[in-house]
Image: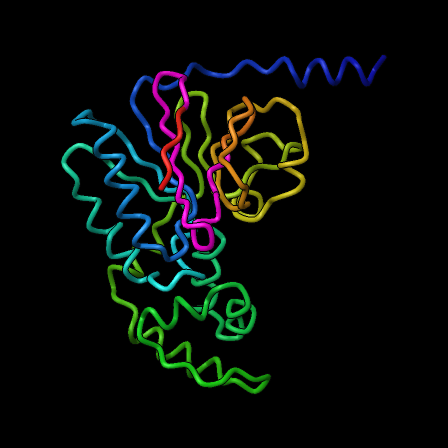
Amino acid sequence: MFAKIIKALRNDVVRPAAPENLIYAVGDIHGRRDLLERLLGQIEDDAAGRDAEIIFLGDYIDRGRESRAVVDRLLAFRGHATLSARFLKGNHEATLLDFLDDPQVGASWAQFGGLETLVSYGVSLPALTDGTRWDSIQERFTSLLPADHLAFYTSLELSIERGCYLFVHAGVDPDLALSGQGEAEYLWIRDAFLNDNRKLERIIVHGHTPEDTPVNDGRRIGLDTGAYATHRLTAARLDHGTVRFLST
């Protein structure tokens, strides 16, 4: 009986209304400037001159070959006349920042896409061994990292709320109130969020975990369709509570 009451309370969450403005959310780009360019063109055509907001969900870098070019394009896009942009931090950007603070992070970063980012900034890499001098690589990367790129990485947001939607990179911990979530949850969570079916205080719009197709199940909207490998970069179009997907 007690378990049934708790379950009922969890599913009796009252969410705010959907936002009235047009919003696009863009999944993990991972160094694919070509796909980003195509998707931005689709969004511009779809918006058809309407004022709208684009929220990028993080993981702009790593894995794909054009991480630097992706950031250049995002910086340029901030000046768009009718589409205002907001940028969330992904776990890959967090790792880049960790590497700037601690060169020994380089060994782990290299294993999940960091090498491609370093090369995109012009860092010449030796053959990697257990004795690789990551401090030298960090110094070289720091010297090649443009000031506006560093400012971009350090200014990335952890979460954005819009009406019934919460935009984050990875997800949330269903066992915590939204007010109790932090970087560990927003950037790194996976199974504990994806495998839970409780109704949450907001519909979570996220990337981080690649899926064959975008997801909209009333609880979450998942937009990572593995662009760097599948060539499919996906955005959600959110307009007065309706959800539609655009994809390359």
Where does the magenta region start and end?
A: 222-243
**Image height check: is 79 above or below 112?**
above
Can you tell which quarter of the image residue 193 is in? top right
Horizontal and vertical percent position of residue 244: 39, 25
Q: Quadrant of the N terminus?
A: top right
Q: Nearer the viewer, residue 88 or 66?
A: 66
Horizontal and vertical percent position of residue 186: 52, 43
**Image height check: is 125 above or below 157?**
below
Whether 238 is among the magenta residues is: yes
Whether 101 is among the magenta residues is: no
Horizontal and vertical percent position of residue 120: 33, 69
Horizontal and vertical percent position of residue 7: 73, 18
Query: Residue visible at 63% across and 13% down?
Result: 12
Specify the farthest residue to the right.
1
In the image, taking residue 197 as reference, residue 228 lies left or right, namely left
**Image height check: is 33 above or below 15?**
below
Query: Residue visible at 46% across and 30% down?
Result: 166
Q: Nearer the viewer, residue 248 or 144?
A: 248
How is the protein colored in the picture?
rainbow
Can you tell which quarter of the image residue 82 is in? top left
Query: Residue visible at 46% across and 50% down?
Result: 230
In the image, taking residue 243 as reference, residue 185 lies left or right, namely right
Q: Quadrant of the C terminus?
A: top left
In the image, taking residue 94 as reference, residue 155 lies left or right, namely left
Q: Nearer the viewer, residue 43 or 169?
A: 43
Query: Residue visible at 53% across and 63% down?
Result: 112
Count of numbered badges drawn on the protein: 0
